[in-house]
Image (cartoon, coloured by chain):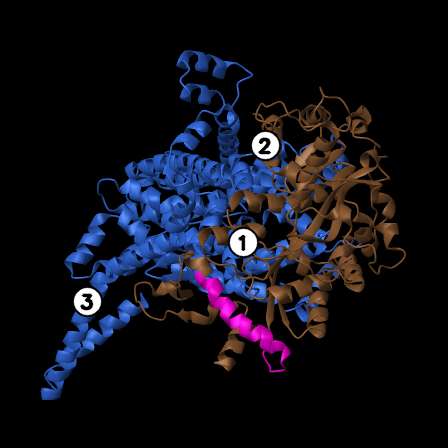
Amino acid sequence: MTTDDSETRRRPARSHTRRRFLTATGAAGAVALAGCSAERVDDGGGDGTDGGNETDGGDTNGGDGDGGDGGDDETPTLTVATYTNFIDAPSVSPGEWLKEEFESRYDATLEWATPDNEVNYYIERAASGAGIDADLYVGLTTEDLVRVDDELDGDLFAEAGEFEGRDRVRSGLRFDPFERAVPYDTGYVSLVYDGTATEAPETFEGLLDDEHAGALIAQNPGGSSTGRAFLLHTIDRFGDGGVASDGDGEAVEGADGDPDYDYLDYWADLQANDVRVLGTWDDAYTAWSNGEAPIVVSYSTDQVFADMEGADLEEHQIRFLNDQAYANPEGMAVFADADEPELAREFMSFMLEPEVQGEIAQRNVAFPATDDAELPSDYAELAQAPADPVTFSYDQLRGNVDAWVEAWERQFAGN
Amino acid sequence: MTGAEDDRVTGAEDDRTRGRRGRAGRLSRLREGWLARLRERVESRALTALAVLTSVALVAAFYYPTATVLIEAVVVDGAVTLGVFADVLTDPFYFGELARLLSGESPVAVTRSLASPDRRLGIVGFTAYQAALSTVASVALGLPAAYLLARFEFPGRRTLRSLTIVPFVLPSIMVAVGFVATFGENGTLNAALAAVGLPPVDLMFTLEAVVIAHAFYNAPLVARVTTAAWESVDASAVETARSLGAGPVRAFVDVVAPQVYPAVLTGAALTFVFTFGTFPIVLALGGFELATVEVFVYRLVRDLSYAEAAALAIVELAVSLGVLLAYLRYEARSSTSTRGARPLPRRPLVPPTPSLRELLPRAGLAAYAVVAGVVFLAPIASMILASVTGGDGALTLDHYRFLVERQQTGAAFQVRPWPAIRNSLLFAAAATLLALPMGVVVAVLTTRRYRGRTLVDAAAMAPLAVSGIIVGLGLLRGLVFGVEIAGWRIAASGAVAIVVAHAVAGYPFVVRTVSPGLSGLDRSLVESARALGASRARVIRDVELPLVWPAVVAGAAFAFAISIGEFTSTVVLATGADAYTMPVAIERFIGRRLGPATAMGVVLLVVTGLSFVVIERLGGEHRGI
């Protein structure tokens, strides 16, 4: 039994696979079913399948988790779900270093899970009653949490609770009012421009000048996170004109102080000045790199990459419009259904240690979430941070963001 | 074919040795008789069994998963409603002036605004409009290629024919890279135009760029399907027409054209359906002003607004199936009799005599070659160039070095090039082997005459017409999460599920390439074979398929191509790091610099190009009777 368990636990598919059988029979279905698994769903309790499986996993892990410290050779496995770039990018990614370092310090195996639909995958799993097969998620954004809470009645993530190092996170970055997600790094979406071709304007209004006609490439806010961040930044600047308020007259006020000019007006002017809105960041960056336009919406860490590949930094200049950039803090949270909740919190604590924070920032090409991260002194020379970061809070996004994007789509693509 | 010959030989030997064997002989005769009867029974049921298996695969890997998503359009919070649909149909944003008609405005007023220059097409209308333009462009660019490949002989013809499908498998990011480098402001085309003193063209971010990209993908489809049909035209029919006094033009119009039309229409209908559901390439080369329906389906699914996403996807499906149905009705009516016994002789590319009649078509082909060079070859050459260009603009092999390095040092959970290549080839080979019998059996069933067969045919084509994003979500729900039956959760993912999903996506091509030929076959051939005692399955294998063999090979090549290029269902079903394919690797290798991704793209290009050559060589030149 113990051997069997340890075997199963090292497999990628975790404890729920304990009762997984290959169906080798059934002639008619053989073609379709050969890669099939059948898993017994427990009838216990009124909680439905999810609860059943949870109890199941809990039993096993309770025993193993405690035993792990006791010196038997049961190594617990921590399954960390994240987005693919976090563990697999052509330049650098923190995944490999984190796994090695964590495993060398803790008596545990770390396994990465990178479902293509990212957080939506787990929302879908929870909604289908299929059980959650990971312990924590790394890479949550404010909008992810809004989507989770809009979609699910139950809790997908547990409260972070107390663990060492948690209070070191900069207070300005904490984006979850319900204290589930703990930030571990942040990025800023800004303009990147080719200094040999143009001098980017210093303000949003400057982008409307004739001089910059056709100069900007942005991304579809419905499909790209940089595109969405830039759209949100324009809403912060110009206000939403009440498009998300259902007619109760309450509007998000813009920092420009003009109630009659909202983000849609600004985008109408941008569109008149020939802005390009392409699909993904790749589309936009490819077109920008080929000189289709001199300015692109991208990350403020662009020079780090440019430096890495030996490009001319003059062609990779950063511009913070109105000295601002939209901040996208990334957080981690333990699944309510986790098999290894204690180990997951140890991992979160590990993620916030000064050395680890420094490594994450460099390998994820981002900025640390704590003030005491160990970073090379010249890191800030290439990775630039704005004087005045801007971001919408959870409460501001919830109930609004879909309407903002939709109103923009309808104006911009009106055929 | 070889099998059939073997059988005949054994049978003859039996006759000769019979009677000399006595008791043992009788026993073995009994056994053989029993075996023969068993074999007959198996053969006579083979078609039914295959049909059942095909249905099971379709239900498990397509109909059920897709239904779990589409149903959300009409079931919202557990209650059945048509409200979401009504909202979409009456929304001018989606349906333009038509929405006013649907919301009850007078047809006269709507017609008047439709005739006015500032009419609104709506997203659906615009999507159909750009698909129609793309279809015209694809046919215009595909037909000359088919003419060249089917009617002329030149060194490398077969290889060129094999390679025509390559553009079909390229991921959109690769095409975007190639197109920006070719048609961009600083692209190859403008450099060439400047060199000959012509003004530059500004193609990027226009509808034209999108239409050309769609032609890049789909003209090869038109060309390949048409070539297969053209190669099946029987030379004796043309000779008969000529001997009866018809001129070459008349013989073409009366004999050749009717047999080639259906294939051209097949290509056109498929192109329309594909470009109607187009998604990443429109935003990469056109921009959000040119957003199509699928762009919104994608955003709505991403934001978990399933009801509206499903309603839009159903609208998409209805339009695409409508086009396919119209085409199928035409195909059913226009079946011409063909035997494909002896293909038309090909003409040499260099004319034997320099007469005007010989030179004119060749001059046309030369002009076409220039256009094809710009539309097809230049973007591909640009991709290859991008894969050997470093960040500083100098030539380098760094990106390929990256692939080798990643292969050697990549972590177990990272995507490495070799497993991606291996998986792509394995999945594609298996999916093709599965898609061929599936496609043939559906083609046979839908060429029989019965009421509602076009509906069955259209339903069998549905995998082509449903939004890829919806299918991906459906596979996640239906296969990865599984279904709960009697206390068991049945789930499927990994290699086998991927192969089945790919086969389901690719088999409609086999149906569409094989079906027109089959329905055009002389029924008396089948009937006489049946009268001679051959089972239905045997007739298909030994009589019908050999007669439409070029179409079978073309269908197999497409099934292979679909599998190689497939991305959405692969990433959904490839749970874990061991079932990823080349397109997944390309996506994974995209970073700040596009070099590594383009290098992997070139690997994809070379591997699939070689595979197509092998497939067509295995398929043989022409295996008519």
Residue type marked 2: Ala
Disc 2 designates what residue? A403
Residue at the image position 32 percent from the left and 70 percent from the top: A25
Q: Colour of chain A?
A: brown
Q: Residues within 10 Å of mark 3 (few under 14, many from 20)?
A: some
| Letter of the chain that mark 1 sits on in the rendering | A
Question: Where does the image place residue A408, in percent across and percent down from the top left?
Answer: 62, 30
| Mark 2 → mark 3, Cα distance in angstroms | 65 Å
Disc 3 designates what residue? B40
Region in magenta:
A52-74
Q: Residues within 10 Å of mark 2 (few under 14, many from 20)?
A: some
User: Along the line of sight, which residue is nearer the eye, B373 or A136?
Assistant: A136
The quarter in which the N terminus of chain B is drawn is bottom left
Question: Where does the image place residue B587, in percent across and percent down from the top left?
Answer: 62, 53
From what the image shows, is residue B394 above or below residue B332? Answer: below
Most common SS among magenta residues: helix
User: Along the line of sight, which residue is nearer the eye, A176 or B224?
Assistant: A176
Q: Comparing marks 2 and 3, which lies closer to the viewer?
A: 2
Residue at the image position 15 percent from the left and 57 percent from the top: B531
For mark 1, give the secondary structure. helix
Question: Where does the image place residue A111, in percent across and percent down from the top left?
Answer: 61, 67
From what the image shows, is residue B317 above or below residue A380? Answer: above
User: Along the line of sight, which residue is nearer the eye, B512 or B569?
Assistant: B569
Residue type marked 1: Tyr
Disc 1 designates what residue? A122
For mark 2, give the secondary structure. helix
Residue at the image position 69 percent from the left and 54 percent from the top: A182
Residue B190: image quadrant is: top right
